[in-house]
Amino acid sequence: MDYAVQLLEEEAHLIGWQRAEFLASIIDVANARLATLEEEARLAGGTPVGDKRNGKRLP
């Protein structure tokens, strides 16, 4: 995973992005993906990502 992020960061630098812009972009995408997973789990009746109250995992 770290290697993939490093490659993406190098590519972003080639098109003129600064490191902070790149990292902020990754965080935004990760947050959006987590929100999607949580919504899918909610609709499926599963436990949201990170919910450890009852020890269940996503379906």
Image (cartoon, rainbow, N blue to C red):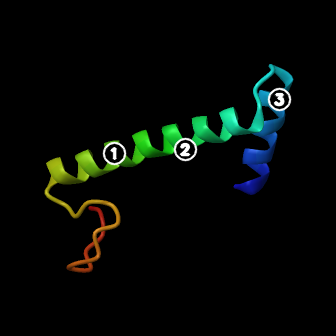
Q: Earlier in the sequence, mark 2 or mark 1?
A: 2
Viewer-nearest residue: 33 or 19: 19
SS state under label 2:
helix
Query: Residue 28 location, x and y as percent?
Result: 50, 38
Residue that label 3 marks: 13
Q: Quadrant of the N terminus?
A: bottom right
* Camera-side mark, 2 or 1: 2
* Label 1 neighbour load within 10 Å: few <14, some 14-19, many 20+: some
| Amino acid at pointer 3 | His
Q: Along the polypeptide, which appears first: circle 3 or circle 1?
A: 3
Give the vertical position of 22 relative to 38 (above or below): above
Q: Secondary structure at mark 1?
A: helix
What residue sits 24% from the left and 53% below the top?
Answer: 41
Q: Are marks 2 and 3 in contact (CB under 8 Å)?
A: no
- Which residue matches tag 1? 35
Q: Quadrant of residue 11?
A: top right
* Residue 21 percent location from the top left of the image: 67, 33
Give the alpha-carbon distance from disc 3 to disc 1, as whole Å: 28 Å
Amino acid type, residue under disc 2 in the picture = Ile
* Residue 3 % position (x, y): 79, 52
Q: Measure the alpha-carbon separation of dots 2 and 3.
A: 17 Å
Q: Is residue 24 left or right of residue 22?
A: left
- Residue positioned 24% across, 46% down in the render: 39
Q: Which residue is mark 2?
A: 27
Mark 3 secondary-structure assignment? helix
